[in-house]
Amino acid sequence: MKNRFIYCSLSLIALEVFFLTANCFAQTKALYVQSEDHLNKITLSLTGDGRLSYKVTRRNKTIIDDSPLGLNCDDQDFTSGLSVVEISPAQKKREQYELKVANNKSVDHVLESRSITFKNRQGAVMILDLIAGKEGVAFRYRFQDGDERVRSIKDELTGFRIVQNSKGWLEPYNKAGKYTPGYEDFYLNVNSGDPIVNSRNPSVGWCMPALFNVNENKSWVLIAESGTDGSYPGCHLKPDATGGIYQVAFAEKDEKYTLPLADKEHAYPESNLPWVMPWRTIIIGDQAGDILLSTLITDLAPPSKIEDASWIEPGKAAWSWWSHPDDHSPEIYNEFTDLSASFGFKYTLFDAGWEKANRDGKIIDHAISKGIQPLVWGYSSEYFDPEKRKARFKQLAQMGVKGVKIDFWCSDRQEVMAAIQSVFEDAAKEHLLVNLHGTTVPRGWHRTWPNYMTAEAILGTESYFYEPRFPEKAAEQNTVLPFTRNVAGPADYTPFALTMRKFPRVNTGVHELAMAMIYTSGIIHFADSKEVFDSLPVQVKNLLKEMPATWDKTEYIIAEPGKSIVLSRQKDALHYIVGINGTNNKLPVSLDLKKWGKGFSKFRLISEGKDQLMEFNVQTYSLSSAWSYVLAPKGGFIIQFIK
């Protein structure tokens, strides 16, 4: 009897061990999520001492190699000693929405999701949410318990291991200053792991988004953030990417030159619980054009918080600063309001110094009398205090102002991320549009707050005043930024600057004109003078009048970062093909225009004139299935299909 009891006990123990082992095996096998089309997959791994890592594959080929995960908090360590507590079933999540500012207006994507709960040696719990879709994968950390006590994170181990010798386009993250970090440096063509060299300013890391060509050049990947709110700082990547591991870094504590921020020993993320952190977003494509058109960043952002967004309208604006930076007279502001009216633009932008010119409502009343909606400039510190911000927005709305351009944020600290979210919210209550300058990159915010029309965070045409290297590098940059910065959100490049400035332009005039149609921005602020606009051929004037500020449908035809880009763009009945050359060489292009221009019989071609820097040639042709063209060095072209 005793032997039988021992036998039964041993059998039960063996059974228990079997089920425990089987359960551990099953959990290990389920530490992943895969896209519905089975192409993209993110897989987690735990080492024997409980260290967490992940790997990203596409068609079972490595995109992101084994990379570290984990958080080191003030009171808990989630970098080692981790074990799996729970794995949720994989679930489908449908993201169906429309964007006010977009390459493609309507979005309908299915994402596969799974949440995995880990505990550390002390029994504290951390959740990792995983997402996989046809455009890539993403993950975020989450603490779900409720606790009023403020916690902080000393370090985030998250890294992105890019295989050695992979080429990339990365922008240095400049050290804090009066104008930095404003995300206004060149994107540099580097190998993974390269140090930062030739940045515009001293730099402390690399910016996101960061673009790489991986998998033996068969795949493209963009590393970015989404959904950052006031509970986390904006993040960049550490400068030392030894072994190709680009590790997440928090905003620096000294990013406080332009705002009334408190001195801190550290600028760690802080929050009470529950705490949902930003998505670490990995966009994947077989072609660079797949990256350009991706909406994964907005797919992951919270849905719109504006119930009725019918008052939000994209449009174009005249803007006096670029051609008359020192003239703040009522006459010059009114002249550009009249320019907007003559071209059928919706807006006019009154930049720094406008308040003096608006005594007795002079320039605002003039704009309203012309049917033009005024946008006005402001300094970030004026909008940082909540009560002052709300009062100022109310005052501007009562004056007839339609939107604000708020400048010189120059910080990614958590307090600034929170203030920016409040700017969107408070502006929306007064039906005001928002344009941020000297600022961080968007992070899907234009879905959550559709009144967020555009942002700088780009090395734009004002650099002809300030940066001696800009003329030579501008064309190349113009073929990189659509795959990097503009994927994160709308970009206020302030295109079409023909007048020569301190550092003279070398791109052709058509290249500059095409930039208004290559970049996506909810409000296009056109640079240059009334005299330049008046001198344009009638067909170019008509193009500027008809050109939309957002698109229903975009397709890429040629997509080569640093070399060339050709896009098909449609809005209602309007259809264009626009292309630019980022190199110093002639580039031949061959297109089947009958395929791209279905329903049209002719097309108008805008190309370089005799003086390629200043003149335009406009010709009309019948559609052909074999159209050939040679892009001029640093040149461009625009095709407008005609019924």
Image (cartoon, grey):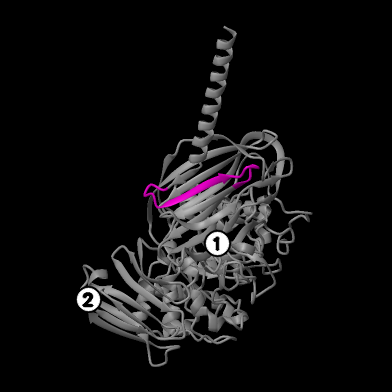
Of labels 2 and 1, the one closer to you: 1
x and y, in percent, of residue 447 in the image: 48, 53
Q: Nearer the viewer, residue 189 or 275?
A: 189
**Residue drawn at x 48%, y 57% as measured from the top left:** 62
Distance between the alpha carbons at the discs numbered 2 and 1? 41 Å
Quick check: 83 above or below 631?
above
Q: Is residue 396 left or right of residue 59?
A: right
For label 2, count other residues whose C-alpha is less than 10 Å away and answer few (under 14), some (14-19) or many (20+).
Answer: few
x and y, in percent, of residue 440 in the image: 60, 61
Which amino acid, by three-letter code, is at mark 1?
Ile
Magenta-colored stretch includes residue 340: no
- The picture quadrant where one finds residue 549 is bottom left
**Residue drawn at x 30%, y 78% as measured from the top left:** 590
**Residue drawn at x 32%, y 71% as measured from the top left:** 576
Quick check: 510 above or below 407?
below
Residue 285 appears in the rendering = yes
x and y, in percent, of residue 620 in the image: 26, 82
For label 1, count other residues whose C-alpha is less than 10 Å away and answer few (under 14), some (14-19) or many (20+).
Answer: many
Q: Which residues are magenta?
A: 35-52
**Residue that badge 2 annotates:** 625
Q: Secondary structure at mark 2?
A: loop
Q: Is residue 588 left or right of residue 623?
A: right
Which amino acid, by three-letter code, is at mark 2?
Ser
Quadrant containing the C terminus is bottom left
**Residue that badge 1 annotates:** 162
Q: Is residue 239 left or right of residue 281?
A: right
Residue 309 appears in the rendering = no
Quick check: 501 above or below 50?
below
- The picture quadrant where one finds residue 1 is top right
